[in-house]
Amino acid sequence: MRYYGISLAVLLLDQVTKWLVLDRMKLYESIPVVDGIFYITSHRNRGAAFGILQNQQWFFIPVTLIVVAVLIYYLWVFRRARPLASWSFSLILGGAVGNLIDRIRMGEVVDFLDFQLINYPIFNVADSAIVIGVALFILDMIKNPAKETGNRFSEVRDGR
């Protein structure tokens, strides 16, 4: 259950921060946090990471629903045997649902974290959780390589 709590915490933080941006800022307004380095910038994204696949909500919504279902299943399967994988799935799940809510509600995702020093695309809390979750999953895969059989699920169910 704690892993679903992590997902819920990510989701709540994501949605509250996006609500604050929508409520208190005009579109494209930018507030310097550390001038020349980091800004809160009200931005919208109708695509995926780095703005790819713009205006393809018909694609993103069903794919995200499938990903969410798979993540919920994996959280159940790996919850005891693979804590690092479970953390990663929790973060990805919370982020995926956060961006899904935006896509369903507004047809676009609210982005606002703007690192101008490195000219990085503007992103949000959900995006951050997804990236951190993927990094943790890669770390888990390195720490726990699949056996020769390649059947990770039997390894988990057998307690290996």
Image (cartoon, rainbow, N blue to C red):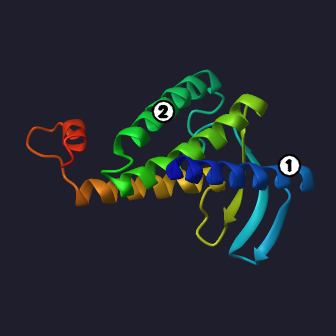
Q: Nearer the viewer, mark 1 or mark 2?
A: 2
User: Which label belongs to residue 48?
Assistant: none
What residue is shown with label 1?
A: 22
Instruction: Identify the amino acid type marked 1.
Output: Leu
Question: Residue at point 69% right, 61% down?
Answer: 113
Nearest the eye: 107 or 91: 91
Near mark 1 (Cα within 10 A), the count class, few <14, some 14-19 or many ≥20, is some
Residue 123, can we see it? no
Q: Name which of mark 1 and mark 2 comes first in the sequence.
A: 1
Residue 155, can we see it? yes
Percent across and percent down for residue 114 are 69, 63
Q: Quadrant of residue 20?
A: bottom right
Instruction: Identify the amino acid type marked 2.
Output: Val
Question: Residue at point 82% right, 49% down?
Answer: 19
- Farthest residue toward the left? 148
Question: Residue at point 32% right, 52% down?
Answer: 82
Question: Residue at point 45% right, 47% down?
Answer: 89
Near mark 2 (Cα within 10 A), the count class, few <14, some 14-19 or many ≥20, is some
Secondary structure beneath dot 2 equals helix
Percent across and percent down for residue 112 are 73, 56
Tell me if residue 107 comes above or below residue 111 in the rendering.
Answer: above
What residue is shown with label 2?
A: 67
Left or right for 115, reference 90: right
Tell me if residue 4 comes above or below residue 144 in the rendering.
Answer: above
Percent across and percent down for residue 37 are 68, 75
Q: Quadrant of residue 24?
A: bottom right
The reply to whether dot 1 and dot 2 touch (C-beta < 8 Å) is no
Percent across and percent down for residue 146 are 17, 47
Left or right for 101, reference 148: right
Secondary structure beneath dot 1 equals helix
Disc 1 to disc 2, how far (Cα)? 27 Å
